[in-house]
Amino acid sequence: MTSDKLNTKFSEAVAFVNDFTEPLPADLLLKLYAYYRIANENFNHPGSSTPLINAFKANAMIQAKDIKPKQAMKLYIALVDKELRNKL
């Protein structure tokens, strides 16, 4: 997949998640969060005002630490396709 096509598919998957109206399981949200942050090369500390949420987000980032940005995009897309789009 070309970089342009990957970026387009990633942007579409992000928009799909942002427009999704049903509640999502916490474990799915944390994976999506980690993949999104890595894909965008944003390694800043989580910014929640709730320490427990920060801990979960930081843990998700630690678990995905060896993933490269393009791989994170592909994983994000695959997770959206498998867990959200295919269940509609």
Image (tube, rainbow, N blue to C red):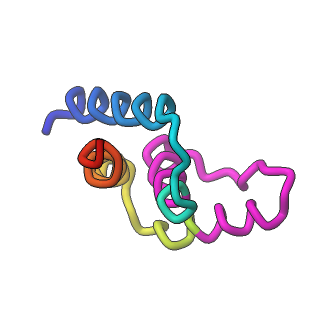
Between residues 52 and 69, which one lies in front from this camera angle? 52
Label count reads 0
Classify the position of the C terminus by image quarter.
Answer: top left
Q: Residue at the location (52% across, 52% down)?
A: 24
Place of residue 49 in the rendered image (x, y in percent of width and height, measured from the top left): 86, 51
Q: Which residues are magenta?
A: 30-59
Write down the quadrant of residue 60 in the picture: bottom right
Please indicate whether residue 1 sits to the left or right of residue 84 in the image. Answer: left
Q: Residue furthest left?
A: 1
Relative to 48, does residue 31 appear above or below in the rendering?
Answer: below
> Residue at 84% across / 63% down in the picture?
51
Pick the front one: 14 or 71? 14
Question: Looking at the picture, how far across and down is residue 48, in whole percent?
Answer: 79, 50
x, y percentage for residue 63? Answer: 50, 72
Using the rendered view, name the quadrant where residue 57 is placed: bottom right
Give the residue drawn at x 58%, y 46%: 42
Question: 78 left or right of 54?
Answer: left
Any magenta on residue 17? no
Q: Main secondary structure of the magenta part?
A: helix
Indicate the quadrant containing the N terminus: top left, top right, bottom left or bottom right: top left
Side of 40 relative to 3 (left or right): right
Left or right of residue 38: residue 61: right
* Image vertical order of residue 69 relative to residue 30, above or below: above
Placement of 55 over or under 68, stated as above or below: below
Q: Which residue is painted at 56% across and 70% down in the image?
A: 62
Residue 35 among magenta residues: yes
Look at the picture and state if 58 lies above or below 19: below
